[in-house]
Amino acid sequence: MADLNTKTIAIIATDGFEDSELTSPKEAVEAAGATTHVISTETGEIEGKKGAKVAVDTTTAEADAASYDALILPGGTVNADTIRIDKDAVELVKAFQSAGKPIGVICHGGWILCEADVLKGVKLTSVENVKTDLVNAGANWVDEEVVIDSGFISSRTPDDLPAFNKALVEEFAK
């Protein structure tokens, strides 16, 4: 297994995240040795759509991409729709991408990538109902379990989590 012992991984999310799309990748990178920090619009804790509660380590206004080695963007329609209008979250995503840091994104998580305008020419997957938004933002959308391209690791739905988590750990270890 890849070693992430020296890595700190950011996870940007807010209330309404798809529980397994945050908790499963978080657990996978932690099991490989990484430290994770959950970043949200406010301090305290956030709650997934099925009731999972996760402590927030810092806010999008206070977070600095330079403090992290990689980023995970979980889905959940409410989460993804809310976080993409947070200017600080969008700027943070832009900073990760411009620094060449890997970004893992699943399901509806890609909406913030549209707002950050970082998808031109990138091969990406997502849940099908986000396809048009990603294509309109310049992505080359494909229907595959996991896609790795231009620093992005993307997957479609919770069904893809085993492959997504494996790819995250491998790519974040590089």
Image (spheres, grey):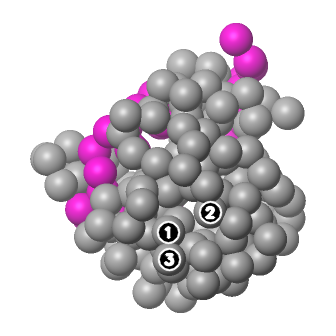
Q: Secondary structure at mark 1?
A: helix
- The answer to whether residue 40 is left or right of residue 134 is left
Check disc 3 and give the amino acid type: Thr
The residue type indicated by label 2 comes to Trp
Instruction: Look at the numbered disc 3 and give the secondary structure of its residue.
Output: helix
Of 95 and 146, nearer the camera is 146
Check disc 3: other Cα within 10 Å, few if <14, some if 14-19, many if 20+: few
**128 sits to left or right of 134:** left
Measured as percent of width and height from the top left, residue 163 is found at: 55, 28
Q: Which mark is residue 26?
A: none
**Does 149 appear above or below 166?**
below
Q: Are marks 3 and 1 in contact (CB under 8 Å)?
A: yes
Residue 67 image position (x, y, % from top left): 73, 56
The magenta stretch spans which residues? Answer: 1-27
- Tell me the amino acid under the disc marked 1: Lys
Where on the picture, by quarter, is residue 170? top right
Q: Is residue 143 above or below residue 88?
A: above
Report, in whole angstroms, how far the alpha carbon at label 2 lies from the one at label 1.
6 Å
**Disc 2 designates what residue?**
141
Q: Nearer the viewer, residue 144 or 105?
A: 144
Q: Which element carries disc 2, helix, strand or loop? A: strand
Q: Residue at the spot x=53%, y=88% of the render?
A: 87
Spot occupied by residue 174 in the image (x, y as percentages of width and height): 85, 33
Q: Is residue 89 magenta?
A: no
Residue position marked by numbered label 1 in the rendering? 131
Write down the residue under mark 3: 132
Alpha carbons under labels 3 and 2: distance apart? 9 Å
